[in-house]
Image (cartoon, rainbow, N blue to C red):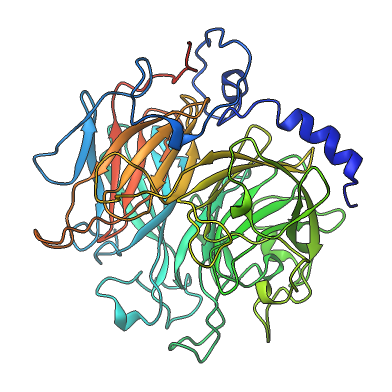
Amino acid sequence: MPLTRRDFAKRSAFAGAGVALAGSVGVLATAPGAIAEAAPDAGPDGAAGGADAAGGHGADRGIGYGPLIPDPEGILALPAGFSYKIVTHCGVTRLDSGEFTPSNHDGTGTFAGRRGTTLLVNNHELKGPRADWPHPVPLAEGLVYDPAASGGCTIVEVAKDGTTVGEWVGIAGTSTNCAGGTTPWGTWLTCEESEHKAGEHGMTKDHGYVFEVDPHDLKAGRNPKPLKALGRYAHEAVVVDPKRGHLYLTEDADQPNGLLYRWTPPPGFRHGRGRLRTLDDNAGVLAAFKCFDSGGRFVDDLSRATRTGTVYGVDWVEVPDRDARTVPVRKQFKDGEITRARKLEGMWWADGGAYIVSSYARAESPVRHDGQVWFYDPKRRTLTLKVLLGVNPDPGEDGALDGPDNITVSPYGGLIIAEDGEGVQHLFGTTDDGRSYPIARNELNIGTADKPEFSEFTGPVFSPDGRTLFANIQEPGIMLAITGPWKRQHRHRP
């Protein structure tokens, strides 16, 4: 039912009381996989300024890991004491079946494997016909949706020391597998960032769906079935509310800008391995978000928020035609019916809600910025701006940040964010009170000496034991295992 203005005023008073980036340290310590270190008394929450107010990477003592040291191998700059191993490398490492590792690594999920290993499901963001790519995802028997499509997922098994045990196909014949999300029941939901229909761009089936991949049971994924109940659009990421059973999904699209969606399961439905694929195509309710401020005024685009701590109330408006047979889902709404945002990207479920990235806003948005991170509280039905990155004046300089994309909540406090902006590319952390610090810098130049170019980072995610941070360099496609003296990132003490 819709929120009233009075309801929202009450809830926003709580949600806006503090703008700690990732919840209090105490809350994060109860998150799955959190490092159970006793936190110091941080005092009352204050109005933090966001990552753009951090005053540089790791400027304050006690946060971060120090300056990044150039890599003699020209791949990954890390702080002193940290090291990396290459887990997979497109065109270099091979699958168990003999083919080369596919290219364009993207969203990644981790799962506990056998005998202390880690299983990773790795998206490959490959768009269009297979002939367009030197190393598409191989068409593994029984695991193919559309034999014309080049994307999909591989599953990688890694030992405790970061060495690769094996790699195999999890799903093939999908398109533009961008982000996705893990489920509480131990599977991976891979999302197609595509709207191509059968007969377009060489495809033989419609694309723009979510598929479920079980890293522990390949038989469960045979004859891949799109989860049509979750809609057909340019999917980015998905998270699951383990308490209410809702799924939240982002859309990376413009002309017009994309939407945040919520899928409500049908009455009596219980989640579990493989159960989503048993649903009818129109099962449950798919709805798009609609925001309003504390005065009850409609908010047309999330870029309108220019201060961290901004709190919006959220209603949900049902999607008329979720399979977008004639009109893309985001175009089925009139102005004033829903709220939009440019480049809705990564999400992560923690602290009882969803952290949501809007990567940047340009001329297609009312207000320009170089990145936002929001937190949606399903209990209060509020959306709070946690991080705001101002427009980066010089992306070629090492230091400023822009274009947050994939995110994860760190077991050591705060968020880990993959940068997908212009110029220099980083993995960076953000503390609970909004300060930023560097973790890694991509030094693999895929351009020229005169015009250097560095691919985005993707898929940051910790191993189940919290000791290893996995992340990808999307092009050409390299998965890295990063280890070192991780420590809890405490709040600043003035």
Residue 400's image quarter?
Answer: top left
Residue at 48 percent of width and 11 percent of height: 493
- Between 220 and 347, the one nearer to me in the picture: 347
> Eyeballing the image, is 327 above or below 389?
below
Total count of labels: 0
Q: Is residue 270 left or right of residue 62?
A: right
> Eyeballing the image, is 114 above or below 46?
below
Q: Look at the image and tell me whether residue 21 can be seen.
A: yes
Query: x, y percentage for residue 460?
Result: 40, 43
Query: x, y percentage for residue 294?
Result: 79, 42
- Between 166 and 394, the one nearer to me in the picture: 394
Residue 76's image quarter?
Answer: top left
Query: x, y percentage for residue 248?
Result: 67, 53
Residue at 71 percent of width and 67 percent of height: 229
Q: Look at the image and tell me whether residue 109 can be seen.
A: no
Give the residue at the far bottom of this rendering: 199
Query: x, y percentage for residue 75?
Result: 18, 46
- Between 160 and 346, the one nearer to me in the picture: 346
> Eyeballing the image, is 185 above or below 206?
above
Give the residue at the far top of this rendering: 41
